[in-house]
Amino acid sequence: MSIRALPILGLLVVSVAACTGTGASAAPGDEAARIAISISDSGCSPATVRAAAGPVTFTVTNDGTETGEFEIVQNGERVIDELENIIPGFVVNMATRLDGGTYAMQCGNLQTTAGVLTVSGGLAASAEPNKVVDQAKLDAARDVYARYVDTQVADLVKRIEVFTTAVERGDLEGAKASYAAARVPWERIEPIAELFPDVDKAIDFRQEDFQGGVNDPEFKGFHRIEKALWADGSTDGLAPFAADLRVKVDELGTRIGALMIDPRVMARGAGELIDEVAQSKMTGEEDRYSKMDLYSIDGNVDGSAEIVNDLRPILQDLDAAYLARLDAANAAVESVIAVYAVGDGFKAFDQVSASDLKLMQARLADLSELLAELPGKLGLAA
């Protein structure tokens, strides 16, 4: 297994001793306070952690059997910082800054019991000035991206209205025809949408993310409806799921409208979108019933390219050769997807040949490796 996914956040792989005991703390006043966390199939160890407001570095070891993640979540509603795709046996550093308060730590997978992080003190001091990029230029790029996100949210709301109306009317073919298009804006802004885990869960979680699988009452959103439309061939009983999806998408729009996007989230997001494709969508598990995966894949690639394009003036000045490699790698991925374009859409994912699937995977890996450098290029790696 490649370690390609690890640098996606611009972080360092290090070797450290495992943390023991029931609690851990970082002493106030440390310039770079450090806390060791072990993640596994059973959750966080230690399960309770204390830190002082300000800069904190979490040294996260995956002691589980599967690729895992580490998230710091505020009020159950907002991801403050995260590590994704941590391979078993590897150790990754996550440098962040925290205000005083109580946070949840999600370790390993989405079904484990969350740990508790208590941060003493008030607001954290502002981050060090960026030594690589003029902050005004970075903020300008961020503002351009924020407008793009707002546009995609508005489009998502419109498309969801068409999709859910067809479901509620019992129009099976109409619902099937509008399903994939409704997902595209969501896929383009996934790094921002995923900052709100409760909304993300209600809109886009898959059946394996729930203890009860397809029969779990919490299994809702796109993929619950997808299963009924294609596997069951019916819209019976779907009206409540359609109404809930519409409400959750509206809520997402409200939350994003109040969000100030961190340039670091934006820079990481370009790589996270491609890593999402490479890690899970290439297996066909995303849209397993409809086989509409190429719509989701193309949406992720579009969203990643948008971030690079919004940062283009900065990257052109910093490292034009690197930008040219990014453009070439992105074009190489898009050229394989384009083979399966039909009108405004795509062929079913099971029509992608084995050779093209392998080629797409290889080109995604190349693009992902390049995007792993993006936060560091912009002075945003920590």
Image: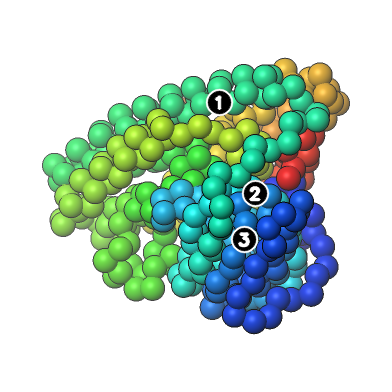
Q: CA distance from mark 3 to mark 2?
A: 9 Å
Point 74% across, 76% down: residue: 18
Q: SS for tag 1?
A: helix
Residue closer to the observer: 226 or 63 = 63
List x then y, in percent, for residue 214: 33, 67
Residue matched to label 1:
145
Q: CA distance from mark 2 to mark 1?
A: 27 Å
Q: Is residue 29 left or right of residue 293?
A: right
Quarter in which the C terminus is drawn: top right
Q: Earlier in the sequence, mark 2 or mark 1?
A: 2
Residue type pointed to by label 3: Ala
Point 16% across, 57% down: residue: 237
Quadrant in the rendering for residue 250: top left
Q: CA distance from mark 3 to mark 1?
A: 33 Å
List x then y, in percent, for residue 48: 55, 71
List x then y, in percent, for residue 172: 22, 46
Residue type pointed to by label 2: Gly
Residue matched to label 2:
54
Q: Nearer the viewer, mark 2 or mark 1?
A: 2
Residue matched to label 3:
51
Question: In this picture, is 358 found above or below 270?
Answer: below
